[in-house]
Image: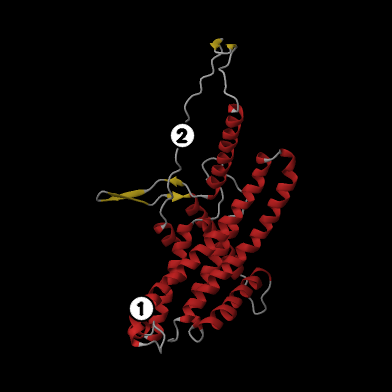
Amino acid sequence: MILLLATVLLAQAQPEPHRQGAPVSDSSQPAAGEHGVTLGHEEVAPGADKAEHEQGAEEHEGGIAEHIFHHVEDEPVVPLGFWIGNRYIRLDITKHVINMWLAAGILLIVVGLAARKRALIPKGGYNLLETFVMFIRDEISTKNIGHHAKLYTPYLCSAFFFILFMNLTGLLPIPAWRGFPGISTATGNISVTVVLALFTFVLTQIAGMRAQGVVGYWAHLVPSGVPVALWPLMFVIELFGLFTKPFALTVRLFANMVAGHIVIFFLIALTLFISVYVAPVSVAFALGIFMLELFVALVQAYVFTMLSALFIGMTQHAH
């Protein structure tokens, strides 16, 4: 799954270069004006100083906003790609791709070390791992899917742990250093959440056709009891409804993860907006949001897994 994510993830757009404004002339020589001689500076109309100050403040705020979004958005690290005719397909290794690899590596190491200590009476890391797996199997998969839950529990466990570790890895305070792009949350990239949602979408359709048959699944897409005259309209509505489910998975995970990071960066930037003396308050609030982000990382992994199981379970029986 990680290799497929890395393959289909397209690189984000390159940041636009900053436009240089027109040079402002500042003559240090005396110049004559209608009100006399100005020494070292040109005459400024009344109110111009205030306008320039407001313009400078707006540029400063814009620079801070751009700096915040620069930490959140993705950027290429190793450019890759190939040509298909006249179209260039970009498959760059980006900052978020590297973070997905790190999350996958940490996940494999943690699960591998915990699974080595299997015992009849679980303890330590294996006990924690078994608790999560049994919760997903019993409380999420079985209760939402039913008899065929064992077929889809491995996918639900993979989705839960992969999203959880991506969310937690993105909270590590490791900046860019000597070519390393730094740590950022891969689930804060909508391209990543789209691919994750597509996995659930494809598996949901397969599960429905497997349970009801290919013809039966699409024939029962419209609930029974609908008048024949409304059947074509209802079929179109239900068909579009299939695509609202992966859309909800995509936006929910993306928006919740990227919003917390923006709030943290903005709270820290208050020291530039207001004064350096508000640093203790802004850092304290940022730390509180950071602790909340740890909880949100777990909740969003749970919500994605729960909704995936719910969507799969809805296809197991005809309406």
First in sequence, mark 2 or 1: give its number: 2
Location of the C terminus by quadrant is: bottom left
The x, y position of residue 291, in whole percent, is 68, 58
Look at the numbered disc 1 and give the secondary structure of its residue. helix
Q: Dividing the picture into quarters, in which one does residue 204 lie?
A: bottom left
In the shown orientation, is residue 39 left or right of residue 98? right
The x, y position of residue 211, in whole percent, is 41, 85
The residue identified by callout 1 is 233
Q: Amino acid at mark 2?
A: Arg
Q: Amino acid at mark 1?
A: Leu
Location of the N terminus by quadrant is: bottom left
Q: Residues within 10 Å of mark 1 (few under 14, many from 20)?
A: few
Which mark identifies residue 265?
Answer: none
Q: Residues within 10 Å of mark 2 (few under 14, many from 20)?
A: few
The residue identified by callout 2 is 19
Q: Nearer the viewer, residue 71 or 6?
A: 71
